Amino acid sequence: MKDIEKRINRGLLEIKPYEPGKTVYEVAQERGISDIIKLASNENPYGMSGAAKKALGEHAAEGFAYPEVTTARFRNELAKQTGLDPDMIITGNGGDGIIYALAMTLLNEGDEAIIPEITFPYYEIAVKAMRGTIVRSAMKDLAIDTDDILAKITHGTKMIWLANPNNPTGLYITGSAFMEFLRKVPDNVFVIHDEVYADFAGKSVFPDTIPLLMKGRENLFIIRSFSKVYGLAGVRLGWGAGDKDLVKMMYRVRPPFDVSVLAEIAGLAALTDRDFYSRTIALTNEEKMYYYKELEKRKLKFLPSQTNFVLIDANIDSRRLADELAGKGVIVRPCAGYGLATYIRVTVGTRNQNERFFRALDEVKGK
């Protein structure tokens, strides 16, 4: 063991580094090509809203100053739109910043955190960094199995992480199923409900968690992000909501200037641009239908998605497929790292991008 490994937080030695999707720059450097589309990271293919873009241009000169620590303007606007008390809201550097602040606030060494076998890997990273103990819950036909989660709860369980809709599957827990699950979770176990993709889910059947928080459900915490439907992934802005006392403690460990001046300005503008929000969701749903039709034509299995991506079983090694697609200028996410050896996750892009993906897929699979 190297000397540094004897001196650092031992929890870090157990962490498998997060593997982000390849960037356009990386593929351009590796392949020597410039005509590239990225369908790997579930960014908004329509960019950011015009209102956010305009606000960033008008206020760029304000970037010299430190931001206000609690992003009061942004929290107050969110409170108006959601009905939540501003003191129940915390902002962060994307949803990831909220995840880390939660782990730092809630976990002591050895505390158990239940995490589904197939889900967003950053939960595991945050828990292990705090020397928590991971308890894996089984999947049921690639869906989160809430019954198995309940069966895994012990006296040592501190928290349950639920991405809903889930990443990378795109599947979700309905509102009625979630309410039944929450009713059975002991009051001393926190349920972290990551709703980063919730804007794309059917509102009539998706869990309506904000009224639960307003009624004082102390063991529920939700996470939201401006990276997806709002198109601000590169700006970095997320928020979470839960019990006031928990949020107050989270602010003790969250970096004081976690949300930049420009991120707050862009977020405030994006909240006003309802046309862009609605258009993004409508176009995404339309293009998902195009995906389903094209995949069925090719007799490829896929999961019906409540997000802006589709998980596809390509029937060949996903890393090799992703590599060959990258050679054709199409970046997708291989899911071998999730234990899904033949699956790729593909962002639902514009019609031109989606057509290009299928052309490249046909060329690779037709070899």
Image: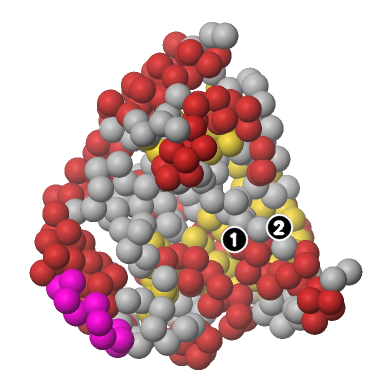
Which residue is at 61% across, 63% downward? 123
Residue lying at 68% horizontally and 32% vertically, measured from the top left: 341
**Residue topped by disc 2:** 16
- Asked if the residue under mark 2 is in contact with the one under mark 1, i.e. CB atoms within 8 Å, the reply is no
Hey, which residue is sitting farthest top in the picture?
Answer: 366
Instruction: Where is residue 267? Give x, y as percent.
Output: 25, 67
Could you tell me which quadrant the N terminus lies in?
bottom right
**Local crowd size for mark 1, using a 10 Å CA cut-off: few (<14), some (14–19), many (≥20):** some
Residue carrying label 1: 122
The reply, left or right, for residue 190 in relation to residue 224 is: right
Q: Is residue 191 left or right of residue 362?
A: right
Report whether 58 appears left or right of 343. Answer: left
Q: Residue at x 41, y 74 (%)?
A: 92
Q: Which residues are magenta?
A: 59-68
Instruction: Say if 95 sits above or below 23 in the image.
Output: below
Q: Residue 195, relative to residue 211: is it above or below? A: above
Three-letter code, disc 2: Lys
Inspect the image, locate mark 1, and give the three-letter code of the amino acid beneath it. Answer: Tyr
Q: Which circle, 1 or 2, is nearer the viewer?
A: 2
The answer, for residue 112, to whether it is visible in the render is no
Which quarter of the picture shows residue 272? bottom left
Disc 1 from disc 2: Cα separation? 10 Å
Main secondary-structure element of the magenta-colored stretch: helix
How packed is label 2: few (under 14 Cα within 10 Å), some, or many (20 or more)? few
> Of residues 280 and 319, which is closer to you in this image?
319
